[in-house]
Image (tube, helix red, strand yellow):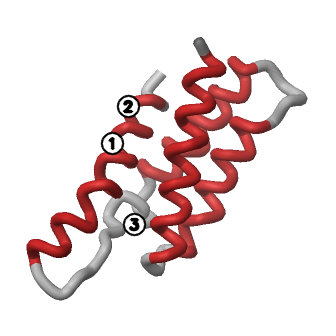
Amino acid sequence: MENLKISHALKLLAELQNIYCKEGGENFVSGIMATMASLSDDQISEKDRWSQACSVYRTMAGSKSGFMDFYIDRESAEQRIIANARLDNIRDELWALFDY
């Protein structure tokens, strides 16, 4: 079970990293990469990997750093809504996954 959650979280984090890099949020990529590194650390148990990743992500997402306030800017309101829908879905899904 944990392995499936880890795989799913890694997929979402990779997509999130791609969005942040592409849309000018590079200053948040190190936190995303740290979360991914925790999940990928084969030297510790899956349970400990998950626990570390949860801690890193929740610290990053729950801080006042602007990680959750980041949005994709576009020309029109309709374009912004469309562009940000996937970003919001990924962050919401990760928050739910990492909420023990």
Coordinates of residue 56 in the picture (x, y in percent): 60, 44
**First along the sequence among labels 3 and 1:** 3
Residue at 81% x, 36% y is 41
Question: Distance of mark 3 from mark 1, alpha carbons?
Answer: 15 Å
Residue at 50% x, 45% y is 12
Type of residue at label 3?
Gly
Q: Is residue 39 left or right of residue 84?
A: right
Q: Is residue 11 left or right of residue 47?
A: left
**First along the sequence among labels 2 and 3:** 3
Category of crowding for the residue at label 3, using alpha-carbon neighbours closer than 10 angstroms: few (below 14), some (14–19), many (at least 20):
few
Instruction: Establish if 60 lies above or below 52.
Output: below
Query: Which residue of the protein is positioned furthest toward the bottom in this rendering?
Result: 75
Between 14 and 45, the residue placed more toward the observer is 14
Type of residue at label 2?
Ala
Question: Distance of mark 2 from mark 3, alpha carbons?
Answer: 19 Å
Residue at 26% x, 63% y is 84
Coordinates of residue 40 in the picture (x, y in percent): 76, 38
Q: Which residue is mark 3?
A: 66
In the rendered structure, are the residues bearing label 2 and label 1 in contact, judged by CB atoms less than 8 Å apart?
yes
Instruction: Establish if 60 lies above or below 83.
Output: above
Type of residue at label 1?
Asp
Q: Which residue is mark 2?
A: 96
Question: Distance of mark 2 from mark 1, alpha carbons?
Answer: 6 Å
Q: Is residue 38 left or right of residue 62?
A: right
Q: Quadrant of the N terminus?
A: top right
Question: For the residue labelled by badge 1, is the local secondary structure a helix, a strand or a loop?
Answer: helix
Mark seen at residue 92: 1
Mark seen at residue 38: none
Q: Nearer the viewer, mark 3 or mark 1?
A: 1
Coordinates of residue 79 in the picture (x, y in percent): 17, 75
